[in-house]
Each structure stands twice: as C-alpha cells, then as structure tokens.
Image: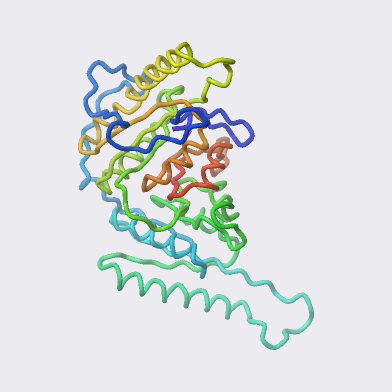
Amino acid sequence: MVSGDAPHGDQRGHIGGRAAKDPPPAPGPGRDQAVRHCPGRRRSPRLDRKRARPVHAKEIAMTQSVVVGFDDTEHSAHAITLAVREATARNAVLRLLHAYQWIPPTTFGLPPGIATEQAVAEASRALLNTTAERLRAENAGLTVETVSVGGDPAGALADEGRDAALVVVGGRGRGGFAGQLLGSVALRVLDRATCPVMIARGAEAPATGRIMVGVDVDHPGGDAGLLEFAFAEAALRNAEVFAVHIWDDPTPLYARGGQFVDDIVEAVRANRLRLLDAALEPWVEKYPNVRVSRQAFPGTPSRMLVDSTRVVDMLVIGGLARTEGHQGMRIGALAHTVLHHAHCPVIIVPES
C-alpha cells in the first residue's frame, strides 16, 4: 500500500490510485485483477523461502485478548462494537479498560460535593461491570474481563496490549471535530503500542467483505508482518484481501500529456503489478482459501487511500516499530492523513 511511508514530515508514498485529479476506481468486477493463479511470477527475493504449510480459517483462532478502551462517549460505543467483533472472530477474551483521572483539591479541606478518589474509582468499576454484563448477555460465549486503572489512558492501553492480539481505540476524542481530528489518546497509544492497533474510524455500515492492505513493492519483504496480519484477518472473516500499491503520479511533470505519457504509465503499472504479485505470493500459498485481488496505479497516495476506505470494511497499514529499546510505533505523514480522514476502521501493524 504505502511505499516508504517515512516518519511524519517525510512522505514518500506509493500505493494505488490514478491521476491525482481523478477519483479512485471503486473496487469491483472489471477493475480488480485476481492473484490466485499467476504462473511465472517472480518471487520476492527476501520472501523466497521454503513454502509454508497452507493455513485454513479454523486454525487461526487465538487465545490472546482483544483490549478496548472506552468511556461514556458515542465514539467508544463504536470501538466496543468493533472489539466484540474482533474478539469473537478470534475466540479471544475481550478486555474492557476504563482509565479514570481524579485531580485532588489544591486548597485545604474537601468542599462538599467533590468526589474522593475512591468514589471515582468505584464509579469506573460500576461502568465497566454494567457494560461487561450487557456484552455477555448480547454475545453468548464471549468472555469479558474488566480493567479499571487510575491515570493516563494511553499508557494503560499500551501496557494491557503488550500480550494482546489487538488494541482497539476510539477514532475521536471528546474535543474532536466530526470527520476530521483523531483523538489524542489514539495517537499516544500508537506512540507506545507494540501490538496491532485498530482505530475505530467511520461508522457502522453494511459489510463489503473486503479488507484493503497497502503494499510497498519497492522494499520486498518489508511488508511481511503487514500481509500476514491482513491475510489472517481475512481468513477469520471469510473476507477478500484487496491489495493496493499507489505510486506518485508523474504526469504533472510533463508539459503535455498524450500517448507518450500513457505508454510510460502503463509500462510502470505492469512492472509494479509483477512486483505486487511477487510480494503477495507467499501469503496466497499460505492462505489458499482467502480470495485476493490487487490494483496498482499512479495518483496522490493519501487521497486515493482515504477515498478507497468508503468501499472496504477495513484498511490495514504499517507503522515503523521503534528500535534501540524504545517501544511503540512511528507513523509517517501518509498514515497521519489516513488516520484523520478514513471512512472505515484502520489497523496499524508494527513493522521492523
């Protein structure tokens, strides 16, 4: 999806679109190109290894937990709905986390009506218990655990997520503007998380049965963890993987368009499709029951990705895992734009 999404401020996008002035092509028959049978495809040099045993959906059920942070806002309700869906698909434990913050009085004495820290903690536990009981009643067989902590919610979510399959965070904070700003908690969770993080963007909508994943064909093997997650997620949901690669549109560099530019674009597209096929091949073999389609085209990467999130259930992108003893992920300018404006949930997977 993203070719070289550098840390914020250094955007080198490559994903899948057409000219920046054109809207992204909607996925569908006649546009997608199947990847199931591609004889003679060149193998990715860093993924050319002993073939993995095929994996089937019933083998993917996990025992890890899905952690979701929530409060009393409508955005948290959407996050909980998504978290329940993910925990159910994985046969995983759902862990509800609520972080409360109590600011002690700065003056002597405790004026009437000001709650003590103990009262705030009890209110947090009551909210958790009520929500957990409702979810157990609505989802037979779902195991729900609760975690109430005092302090920073982002740090608490990152800590709980160390051994989790997924952390789910609301897409907007209390002070965000609809459709625009990502909540500060979500950004701080990404800055500390060591597991995949789902940002609950968008709203409830009919399922399309598609999971979109961005692939960087310029760095073969660099998207291995990203593709592994996307294919496993698709297998759990009986969904299709829609792999896209977008590279920056070169046509504005030419004073005139015409056949010359069209020929160049088509030649580049054909080459990048070959590279995309090579990147997908190991995962197509490992997950033989997962349907796959792919596109490669020029355009403005961030714009094309955001527009494409209207017609898929989920977008999976990568975040650069921190090194040298530091936890968390760094996300580039492209990922920042997508997270702020996406119309569907976005999962960020740590990549080395």
**Residue at the top extreme?**
260
On screen, residue 61 above or below 149: above
Is 123 on the left or on the right of 163, as rendered?
right
Q: Which colour scheme is used?
A: rainbow
* Front position in the image: 181 or 326: 181
Residue in the image at 54% along x and 44% along y:
328
On screen, residue 153 above or below 334: below
* Front position in the image: 225 or 280: 280
Q: In which quarter of the image is residue 269?
A: top left
Is 133 on the left or on the right of 50, as rendered?
right
**Residue 227 % position (x, y):** 36, 35
On screen, residue 106 above or below 312: below
Q: Quadrant of residue 172?
A: bottom right
Residue in the image at 43% along x and 44% along y:
309
The N terminus - image quarter: top left
**Residue at the right extreme?**
107
Residue in the image at 46% along x and 41% along y:
307
* Front position in the image: 13 or 47: 13
**Residue 14 % position (x, y):** 49, 28
Is 51 on the left or on the right of 343, as rendered?
left
* Front position in the image: 279 or 109: 279
**Residue 46 % position (x, y):** 38, 21
Residue in the image at 49% along x and 29% along y:
299
All told, the count of numbered labels is 0
**Residue 50 % position (x, y):** 26, 24
